[in-house]
Image (cartoon, coloured by chain):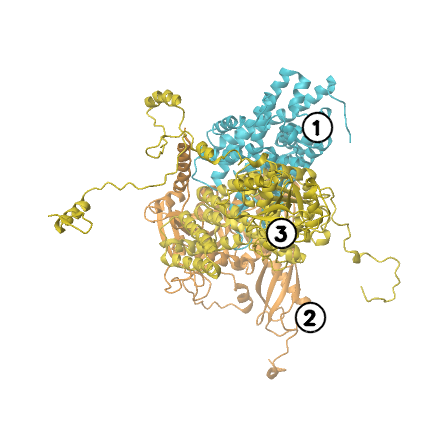
Chain colours: A yellow, B orange, C cyan
Amino acid sequence: MADVNDNGQKTDSFLTQMKNAVIKIITFQKPAATEGFILYGIDDTPQDHEVTGDTGKEKKRGKKKPLRVKRTVPGETQEKDVREQSKKEYNREGLHDYRKLLVDPGLKTNKRCIEEIYSLPKNKDIIIRDLIISAEQPREAFAVFVEGISNRDTVNEDVLKPLMLMAKFEKNVDIMDMADYIRKHVIYSNQVDIHDKYEDIIDKINYGSTAVFIDGSPRCLVIETKGWDRRSIGKPETEQVIRGPHEAFNETLRSNTGLLRKAIRNPNLITEIMKIGERNKTDVAVMYLEDLASPRLVEEVKRRIESISTDYAGETGVLEQFIEDHPFRPVPQVMVTERPDRAASFIMDGKVAILMDGNPNVLIVPTTLFTLLHSPEDYYLRMPYGNVVRFLRVVSSFLAVMTPGVYVAITTFHQEMIPTDLILAVSAARETVPFPTIIEVFLMEFAFEMIREAGVRIPGVIGNTLGIVGALILGQAAVQAGIVSPILIIVVAITGLASFAIPNYSMSFAFRGVRFIFTALAAVFGFFGISAGLFILLTSITSMKSFGVPILSPIGPRTKTGPDVVLRGPVWSMEERPDFLDTLERRRQPDISRGWVKPLLNEDKQGGNGDE
Amino acid sequence: MGKRLKTGILLLNCFLFFLVPGCWGARETDGLGYVLSMGIDKGKENILQVTFQIAMPQAPGGNGGGEKGRNTEIVSLEAASLFGALQLANAFVSRDVTLIHNRAVIISEELAREGMSKYINPLIRSREIRRNTFLIVTRGQAREFIEKNQPLLEKNPSRHFELLLEGKHFTGFIPDSTINDFTEGVKSPGKEAVTSLAGVNEGNKGEERGWNVTEKARQETAYLPGTVPRVGGNKIEFIGLAVFRGDRLVGFLNGSQTRYYQMAAGMFESAVFTFPDPRYPQTYIISMEVRKGRNPDIHVDLSQEVPRIQIDQVLEGEIMSIQSGESYETGENERELEEYIAGYISREVTNVVKAAQREFGSDIFGFGNYTRRYFWTWEDWVNYSWLERFPTAEVRVNTIVAIRRTGLMAKTVPIASQKGGE
Amino acid sequence: MNNSDSNLIKLGHSEAIAVTMIFLGSKAFLGYPRMMAQMGATAGWIIILLSSIFSIAFWLIISSLLERFPGKSILEINEVVLGKYLGFGLNIIALLYIIFSSSLLLRLFSEAVILTALPHVPISALNFLFLIPMFVAAYLGLEAISRSAYISLPFIMAGTFAVLVFLYPFWDITELYPVLGAGAWPLLKYGFLNTSAFGEVLILAILAPFFSFGPERLRYAGITSIVIVAVSLILITVVYLMVIPMPGATENLVPFYQLSRTIYLGRYYQRLESVFILFWTFTAFLRLAIGYITAALITREIFKIPYYRPLLPALAVIILSLALTPEDVMKTVELEKQLRLFYGWIITFFLPSSVGAAAYLLKKGDRRGKKA
């Protein structure tokens, strides 16, 4: 029974609808063809002749070659190289390759070039401002800048205003010298350059400058108008000290170099700026003292940085991985710091600082293992206090690495080492525990590490509290449930606390990783395993170099150094710079650096200014 | 070989690491049964009856203090050898019985008289037994000793032994007696071995003996274990030493003699002595804490036919009690006291050495070591056979006692109501 | 990694001394004090004194040979002085000696570890396990090993002397008499034969091109190492004889372990020997790694191969199989005693000295060149 609805179409009756619905539910429906997006795969399979050549032998051995699935859009022919195709589309009339372009005297040509390079009007970040330079003979011009990284006020005040309002020209200026004239007489911004290659101009526009193209001039003015929202100089997030400055680097290269300049007011402090990254061209600044740092060291640093060819290197962490000597060893070979005071003291030692735009971590090369375990506060405190802290840190380092391993070794292999009282207590506590010691240890260690990681991501106050409370409660609950023995909780807690005493973030990872390895070795071979692990660790560390400096100097190869290796001497006895840096000048201070302790010669003892 | 296969094999190897521990000697702490003390007796059915005192684990701080139950399990078995007994014990003790925390080896008198050399060998050779384990000879059965040993103040029997045996530093009742000392003594051509003597005291109320004060003062510590007149406390006691000749037990020295032995052997440190008062030997006594002043000078002179042994010692004293009230603290009196005590001690030491010579014929004092200087080579010295010549040697002891301190009192003022009278 | 290794690696004075000291001194942790007690009774330490004097005398001869050819190793000198074939033969003997002694020591150390720390591990597994850190260290190079030796040496010496000092309550000087122990003539005889205990000082001659200093300082380095090691060995033997006196001293298989077990400073400081296991296994690793890499370097030198790293696996197999050859502990001990006592001094001292004499007679090399 067919009905007709309002549109004149046939509609089914109720029963037929029900029937259709039931059929629809219980049978398979072919899915409607929708438009979907498939990422084109790249054809990577080996050439045809190889495949046929091998399949004969392959079949004999019964091995299967891994098949690579080729995805194709249904209906279209397969493109051999999709990348090539997309590139072809992308390449419009070769103008994208702007590196070889020169500024054209014609204004319209320049404007068109800019529009094409930046894909205007799609790209809304780039602003083209047409203007007329108010001279006796008004000239057309336009300014190009990127919104967001250029300071609006500076562009208005220092570029547009002088050009449009205050251009005072003397009679006729030759069009060829026009740009130069404007630069010298009209625009009063503090950094103005003249360029004629698009390469330079585009790079500068990308970093916040404004380019002014003048009609008829084959040269272009580029004015520095950088300015963007940035985090102000804040407190160091990872390297906090009680006694010492609380400034930290922030994400802007220029602020950071400024902070270092402020600390070292020496004309010999050189900042060399290079770019790395093909597509993003981040600025990397290398800072060093020219009369101090070994020239070969500086050469090597620059060589390594300049030879990096990659697409994107955005963070000093990535840069560090590119330039380090041993990427697979546990100990880091560059020092990372967030504090300008620390970076400055390293530069004053003859080391080289590498700063990068966009992040506050500064790399210092070369470094030694001992420097990695120092904290800046050691120097700001008086010698006895500094040494107490250092000593504590040495003990913590050992504890952080060895404690679980030693515990496992003793309780499974060397039970004779524990006093009888303790062993009876331990074995009583282990009555209820279903796991062997090694599994217990790994469980608790793992739990602790998880809590630690979780604490990093939870915001604010909750994070810290959760860490401590979580660990305690977890431990207590585990003991009550009889899963772990109470002594183990103490061991894990001591290890965790000790590992927090390591000042350097990368080093703490090194310690954590090495600790697991030691525990595993101890579980299998007892003290012998620990000894073997120590030996391998020691030899691998002594064979590491950080930019040509062996990482265990001044103890590895014995070199002359001041009293500042593990414990430190008083400030006035650190007379020489570390030998391994090969600095141009070795002496920091003369033998007697406190002038007031010099014995007075030929002084009348008449009481005078008080007693000695 | 593809990368995946390699990674797979590597991961499998790493995983195997964790399976290995069970196979190569890793043992969990709660899989071991710790023997705290071991006793060796003569066996009936087999050669030895070995007693093990195995610790029962107590939870830390928890329920251990509540009921004063036993925290050790004592098992005895008969076997042909020590390690055979250890193995056999595993037939009924659930954990792997191990001797690594064994603190004392107790040997019965009977067995020691037969000769110890058989049992020393496993004690030294085995890795599980440490050489500073105490070696004790007990009067009676070792098993009885271990069973009757109920430490009152400690939960842990091994600690109890350690603390008890540390008493030698300030009482002088027992000598150094570890397996190390014993083997040294047994194997050395210059001295003979001794061990501490122990025994079980079932409570001894003491008897009327009819001694006068002098004798009572002398007899104060001259007991063998098991006979000390006391009631209460742990039933076992350590006092006196066992004298060995070669590897056989030949006799005992009581507590008082052991102190003088310590002086002659040069290991005396301090002890509290009770002497009869020099002026009133029948009525009053003097207590003094005597300490070593200097290491004793021992000379052995081999130039004559019989070896002459000369012992010179300097002792310091601190007066602890003067019953008679005489002012021995100062002047002539002090010297009189010093000489009296020096003579007393010298006599006693000589008596002990003579006893060792006559009754036991064994140089337990180690004088032989002082004869080494007369020889150039080891063989010559060994051939001299000091140990056989010792019983014929002459001994002279010279003691100097210097009273250094007198406690808190500078002099004794007589009691008022008795002024002028007795 | 290539022949220019000798241009790149330059070890300093302290590192050379550290390497030699560990190469010489690690035997103190094995049965050495017992052997001194066996040979010299209570005067075992006199044997050490005598052999150190003899070895210093030999070393002076060898180092004067080295002075004639500054910067060259003894292997090259052998070839120069004695001609290609004889020199090659001599070098092969030296190589075999180092391989044999390293494998014997490997076996002895593993036996010692099994005895003291890991009773149930099979010997082959433990030998193999010893080999892994050795291999890693040798792969990483001579610099890494020598620096590690330099760094760990103070700790090892501190640990050893701590054991000796902690035993103070047990010292008994009377046990050291009679002074001449076994007698003057046996002492002299064993003193001379035992010179080969210090024969490993030859390593300085073998590694001469890797050092950054010249032959005069080399001589000084050799003398210093011999003296310090001799003093340490004497102290260890003396304390051993005092604490575990004759004749029981001749019984202990691993004397140092017994010594560390005897420590009893009171109720709480008594069971510390496992800590000392750490120290002397570390020494074992160092000693074996040094021996291993020296063998590889010698092979590279003799057969004129440009690299030494590919030789490492092969050498590992050789050393491992040699180590597993003796059937039990006592046979190994006997073998080591025989090898060292009777052949050691010939190979390590006598032969180079005769080469020195030959060089002098044949007037090869500069005569006493630099005396700066």
Q: Are marks 1 and 3 in contact (CB under 8 Å)?
A: no
For the residues labelled 1 and 3, the Cα–Cα distance comes to 84 Å
Percent of width and height locating residue C190: 62, 31
Residue C135 in view, yes or no = yes
Report the quarter where the C terminus of chain B lies. bottom right
**Marked residue chain, label 2:** B
Q: Residues within 10 Å of mark 2 (few under 14, many from 20)?
A: few
Percent of width and height locating residue C44: 62, 37
Quarter-wise, where is residue A610 in the image? bottom right
**Mark in the foreground, 2 or 1:** 1
For the residues labelled 2 and 1, the Cα–Cα distance comes to 73 Å
**Marked residue chain, label 1:** C
Q: Are marks 1 and 3 on the same chain?
A: no
Please state the total of marks drawn on the protein image: 3
Report the quarter where the N terminus of chain B lies. top left
Which numbered dot is residue B330? 2
Residue B378 in view, yes or no = no
* Kind of residue at disc 2: Thr
Q: Is residue A490 left or right of residue B407?
A: left
Which numbered dot is residue A160? 3
On screen, residue A115 above or below A495: above
**Mark in the foreground, 1 or 3:** 3
Q: Secondary structure at mark 3?
A: helix
On screen, residue C366 above or below B210: above
The residue lying furthest to the front in this view is A137
Q: Nearer the viewer, residue A378 or B389?
A: A378
Q: Residue at x 74, y 18 (%)?
A: C363
Q: Nearer the viewer, residue B330 or C245?
A: C245
* Kind of residue at disc 1: Ser
Q: Which residue is mark 1?
A: C63
Quarter-wise, where is residue A280 in the image? top right
